[in-house]
Amino acid sequence: MDDAQYNHLKNIYDKGKGRYVLVYGVLGGGLTFAILFSLIIPLVDPTINFGLLFPIMLVLSLPACALLGMSMWKSIEKQYLPVKHIKDEQVASAEAAKKESEAAKKASEERKKELIKKYGEEDGMLIFKRKISETNYKKKKELIKKYGEEDGMSIFEGEISLKNYKA
């Protein structure tokens, strides 16, 4: 079922069963049939009186076409409801994914602010962008603090092993 068909059925379904049966069954089918039949039969047999035939045709055709309208409504439900459930699930899934994405983005922004507050703008952004892990950053700072900038960086980068370090 394409989107145009789906939207058409949705429009009909949203207006309700009662309206559909009234408009398409009773008025669209029953009243139309009663009028046409009451006009055509006197042309075929002039002895039949339109004034008598029309009320009889109304009494017979309106309930019959109401039943027809209910039958047509069942057909619409069989076409529309399975597709509606699928579309509803797709919408719910998309909304859930959007909420999840927004929550992840918010958590990411909070983590970014936390890292910048804790380590400063430059170092916080390095950790946030995963240029260096928070654990390695702490090790690096500890080595620099203990052995100085040059030696601490050499030890951290593996150029000098801690066992071979001589002050």
Image: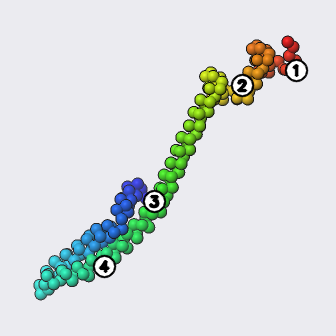
Badge 2 marks a residue whose secondary structure is helix
Within 10 Å of disc 4 (Cα), the crowding (few <14, some 14-19, many 20+) is some
**Residue 165: image location, x then y, percent:** 86, 16
Query: Which corner quadrant holds the C terminus?
Result: top right
Image point (59%, 33%), residue name:
110
Circle nearer the viewer, 3 or 2: 2
In the picture, measured across the screen, residue 68 lies left or right of residue 147, that is left
Question: In front of the other: label 1 or label 2?
Answer: 2
Question: Relative to residue 73, is residue 132 depicted above or below?
Answer: above
The residue that appears at 26% across and 79% down in the rendered structure is: 61
User: Spatial distance from mark 3 to mark 4, Cα to Cα?
Assistant: 30 Å
The answer for how far apart the CA atoms under marks 4 and 2 are is 83 Å
Q: In this view, does 136 lie to the left or right of 2?
A: right
Q: Name the residue tied to disc 3.
A: 84
Residue under pointer 1: 163
- Residue picked out by circle 2: 137
Which class describes the residues within 10 Å of circle 1: few (<14), some (14-19), or many (20+)? Answer: few
Q: Which colour scheme is used?
A: rainbow
Badge 1 vs badge 2, beta-carbon distance below 8 Å:
no
Task: State which mark lies toward you, 1 or 3.
Answer: 1
Q: Residue beneath label 4, please?
A: 64
- Image position of 13 with respect to 103: above or below: below
Image location of residue 155, percent across then percent down: 80, 19
Which residue is situated farthest in the left direction here?
Answer: 46
Earlier sequence position, callout 4 versus callout 2:
4
Residue 134 picture quarter:
top right
Amino acid type at image mark 1: Lys
